[in-house]
């Protein structure tokens, strides 16, 4: 490993309070690249099958990639992962800001938290000096409050990853927060940190990232920056960032509204990017080396309440706005602030609260159970439920387990409108009239998340009724987009302003000295994809095709209003797409990776494990 | 470790900042470090970004203005001005760090493992890649990209 890698992995054991570093395995770097590849490989190898997600055997892994911290656009992504308490399978979540690069500058390719502490702590990493300090004074504090306190105590130049009360209380939808508004949101990684009593990880580093060809990186990095500056999208997309897409998602009838009951929100203009920019925006806030900062730091006022908050980004606009029907950008931003402080993922949070509001409306849960009347579009109802969830109080203790578990508890048909796949709540694109996007959610390896394959534009371009060719497109995207997660950089320049993917393998070679083709990169993403799929079969007895279906609402209830009125996906269309998908992936009809597929990817251990479990 | 030379006059810029345009991405610091020292390490960059968060929510760019206060306090005249740019003569410098203390912007930096400080030579590597034009050459523009 000539460049890009720092050569060490840090292991912190919370049970006995020790820390030591180990050399980064060059074979792991060759086959899994870094970032999400490292996270999933380490979890697969080290967390025993059947481990309690909130017990001492689970681990939290945080890994930047070989390109993280390097002179090129948006090289600031870190991946967090753990066995998810929400899904029971391996989860991960990526986060921008400056945490990834600080891990690199401190000298590490990954940080592993293992064991379980008995008292609140902060893991302090200052280059080679690693200490687990008492975290009692920060415990119970909101994310940004705790982050500021820790920076005041340790130094402004520390980068902090912190959990809020939701993480402390082991809420399944708890996130990890950083830099006053960036989150590793999905899969409840915050709850796993909370189970280990780790309030925060604080990192400071002083080292350079080694480069195989420093002059080449300087020259090519500039070329990449200028390549971004020259794209029309650099000027057109950046001012509004991700919420700029809100009107389009409504126009195409895909905006999650009223717990995904419909797909067009009448008040969408009041909560989108234009409203944000005109009414609450203070400054753009970029992740490390980002030429197109999507972070829109804001100040919002609702009645007598006022708050500083980053965002809301598109997902938050969709899930807190449309899905809970908050109808002004000020309210959406305030709800965003409440979730951030409590440490709740806004995607899952907006789902769970939307689900609770629908259950209340239908009488599935009573006012007495909830503790007060709640209604759609009411900021006080939203804040009340968010706090109940984050503190696991009353009805919040059930909702805190996510919509899947809550619907199983509530029954009465509520499973049909518990909007998730595999126990992970659905993100911001409703897909009853977007088959490829539907398939993307169905097959995403962590559950219903959009970032592996944002295929809705393909549906819009190629036909929204038909299923032909959709599986191939979804798989193509599931190779390109996760490549960024392995490399440790952001995909938004590629997806939003059309910056060419060809640049990345070239930069990878200048940084690491290793020549890599796009095919080899995609093979690495397939390796991770099959690893997580295999692991899911090992963890869950009934895993397979049945786990890949969306909630019944999407194939039983036609969309009632808006541009997609009357649209519905048929169950047989779901099966057609799954058949195509499994075949193209080299999986059997139940979605199990075949021996040949695993062999081709060099995943002999997966073959062995599936055989031992009598699945293969 | 390769060192990149920016001695030609074409590279000398009069740095200025529009703080409100800064998004805190720190590419300026990294461009500086890689261009001037051949090191991929923003901590070595000869300018700084102060982040004022969570409130009031703004960034502030600390950069050399070639004000000359460093030269004024140097006891051995190791810092001299040519074409509006102050440079440290490493052979003359006695590493007393009086300039580090005196710099009103806090951007004369002593790198780890070194005695002699480093300062901005107005090469413009930061200006070149700032995505928003928050740091710019006031001789040739008014900021913004």
Image (cartoon, coloured by chain):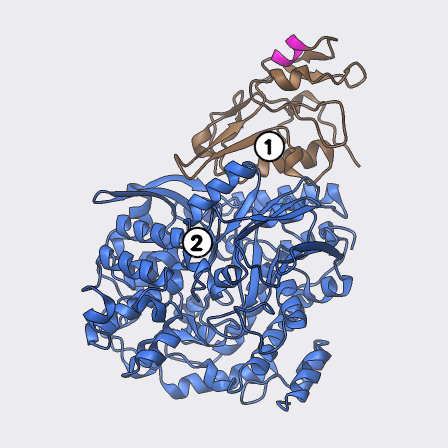
Chain colours: A blue, B brown
Residue found at x 52% / y 85%: A544
Report the quarter where the C terminus of chain A lies: bottom right
Say what secondary structure mark 2 lies in.
loop
Q: Residues within 10 Å of mark 2 (few under 14, many from 20)?
A: many
Residue at image mark 1: B126
Q: Is residue A306 left or right of residue A546?
A: left
Highlighted range, magenta: B69-73
The reply to whether discs 1 and 2 touch (Cβ–Cβ < 8 Å) is: no
Q: Is residue A543 visible?
A: yes
Q: The numbered mark 1 sits on a residue in which chain?
A: B
Q: Is residue A543 left or right of residue A570?
A: right
Residue at image mark 2: A164
- Residue A490 position in % (x across, y down): 55, 54
- Residue A185 position in % (x across, y down): 46, 59
Q: Quadrant of residue A297?
A: top left
Q: Up-down: is A572 above or below A371? A: below
On whether residue A209 falls in the magenta region, the answer is no
Residue found at x 46% / y 76%: A422
Q: Up-down: is A37 above or below A411? A: above
Residue found at x 27% / y 83%: A412
Q: Up-down: is A424 above or below A544? A: above
Q: Is residue A201 left or right of residue A439?
A: right
Disc 1 versus disc 2: nearer the observer? 2
Q: Is residue A493 left or right of residue A616?
A: left
- Residue A589 position in % (x across, y down): 54, 90
On whether residue B71 falls in the magenta region, the answer is yes
Q: Is residue A180 visible?
A: no
């Amino acid at each position: 490993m000539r460049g890009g890698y720092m050569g060490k992995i840090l292991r912190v054991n919370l049970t006995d309070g020790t820390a030591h570093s180990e050399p980064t395995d060059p074979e792991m770097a060759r086959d899994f690249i870094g970032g999400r590849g490292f996270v999933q490989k380490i979890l697969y190898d080290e967390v025993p099958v059947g481990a309690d997600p909130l017990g001492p055997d689970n681990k939290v892994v945080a890994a930047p990639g070989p390109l993280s911290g390097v002179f090129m656009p948006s090289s600031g992504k870190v991946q967090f992962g753990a066995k998810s308490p929400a899904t029971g399978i391996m989860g991960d979540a990526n986060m921008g800001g400056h945490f990834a690069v600080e891990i690199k500058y401190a000298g590490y390719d990954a940080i592993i938290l293992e064991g379980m502490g008995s008292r609140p702590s902060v893991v302090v990493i200052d280059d080679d000096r690693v200490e687990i300090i008492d975290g009692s004074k920060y415990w119970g504090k909101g994310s940004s409050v705790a982050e500021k306190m820790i920076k005041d105590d340790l130094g402004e130049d520390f980068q902090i990853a912190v959990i809020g009360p939701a993480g402390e209380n082991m809420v399944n939808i708890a996130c990890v927060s950083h830099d006053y508004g960036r989150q590793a949101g999905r899969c409840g990684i915050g709850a796993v940190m909370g189970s280990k009593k780790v309030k925060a990880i604080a990192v400071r580093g002083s080292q350079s990232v080694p480069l195989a060809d420093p002059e080449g990186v300087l020259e090519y990095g500039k070329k990449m920056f200028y390549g971004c500056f020259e794209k029309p999208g650099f000027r057109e997309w950046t001012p509004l960032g991700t919420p700029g897409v809100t009107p389009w998602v409504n126009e195409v009838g895909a905006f999650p509204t009223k717990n995904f009951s419909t797909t067009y929100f009448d008040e969408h203009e009041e909560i989108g990017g234009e409203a944000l920019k005109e009414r609450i925006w203070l400054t753009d806030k970029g992740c490390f080396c980002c030429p197109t900062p999507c972070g829109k730091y804001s100040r919002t006022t609702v009645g007598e309440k006022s708050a500083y908050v980053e965002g809301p980004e598109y997902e938050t606009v969709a899930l807190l706005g449309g899905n809970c029907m908050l109808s002004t950008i000020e309210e959406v931003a305030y709800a965003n602030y409440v979730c951030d402080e409590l440490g709740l993922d806004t995607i899952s949070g907006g789902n769970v609260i939307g689900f609770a509001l629908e259950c209340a409306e239908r009488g599935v849960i009573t006012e007495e159970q909830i503790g007060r009347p709640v209604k759609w579009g009411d900021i006080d109802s939203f804040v009340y439920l968010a706090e109940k969830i984050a503190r696991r109080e009353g009805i919040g203790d059930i909702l805190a387990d996510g919509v899947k578990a809550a619907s199983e508890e509530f029954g009465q048909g509520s499973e049909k409108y518990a909007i998730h796949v595999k126990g992970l709540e659905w993100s911001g694109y409703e897909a009853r009239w977007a088959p490829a996007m539907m398939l993307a959610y169905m097959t995403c390896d962590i559950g219903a998340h959009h970032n592996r394959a944002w295929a809705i534009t393909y549906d819009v371009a190629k036909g929204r009724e038909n299923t032909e060719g959709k599986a191939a497109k979804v798989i193509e995207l599931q190779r390109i987009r996760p490549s960024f997660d392995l490399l440790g950089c952001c995909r938004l320049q590629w997806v939003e302003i059309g910056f060419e993917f060809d640049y990345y393998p070239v930069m990878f070679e200048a940084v690491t000295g290793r020549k890599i083709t796009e095919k080899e990169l995609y093979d690495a993403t397939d390796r991770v994809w099959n690893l997580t799929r295999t692991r899911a079969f090992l963890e869950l007895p009934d895993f397979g095709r049945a786990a890949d279906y969306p909630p019944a609402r999407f194939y039983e209830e036609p969309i009632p209003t808006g541009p997609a009125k009357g649209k519905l996906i048929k169950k047989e269309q779901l099966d057609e797409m799954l058949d195509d998908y499994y075949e193209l992936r080299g999986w059997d009809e139940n979605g199990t990776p075949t021996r040949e597929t695993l062999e081709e990817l060099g995943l002999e251990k997966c073959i062995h494990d599936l055989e031992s479990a009598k699945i293969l | 470790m390769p060192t990149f030379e920016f001695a030609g006059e074409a590279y000398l810029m009069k740095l200025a900042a529009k703080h409100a345009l800064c998004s805190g991405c720190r590419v300026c610091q990294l461009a500086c470090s890689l261009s001037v020292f051949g090191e991929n390490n923003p901590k070595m960059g000869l300018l700084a970004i102060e982040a004022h968060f969570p409130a009031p929510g703004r960034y502030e760019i600390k950069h050399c203005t070639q004000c000359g206060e460093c030269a004024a306090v140097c006891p051995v005249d190791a810092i001299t001005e040519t074409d509006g740019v102050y440079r440290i003569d490493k052979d003359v410098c006695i590493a007393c760090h009086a300039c580090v203390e005196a710099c009103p912007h806090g951007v004369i930096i002593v790198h780890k493992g070194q005695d002699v400080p480093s300062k901005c030579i107005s090469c413009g590597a930061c200006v070149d890649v700032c995505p928003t034009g928050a740091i710019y050459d006031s001789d040739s523009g008014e900021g913004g990209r």
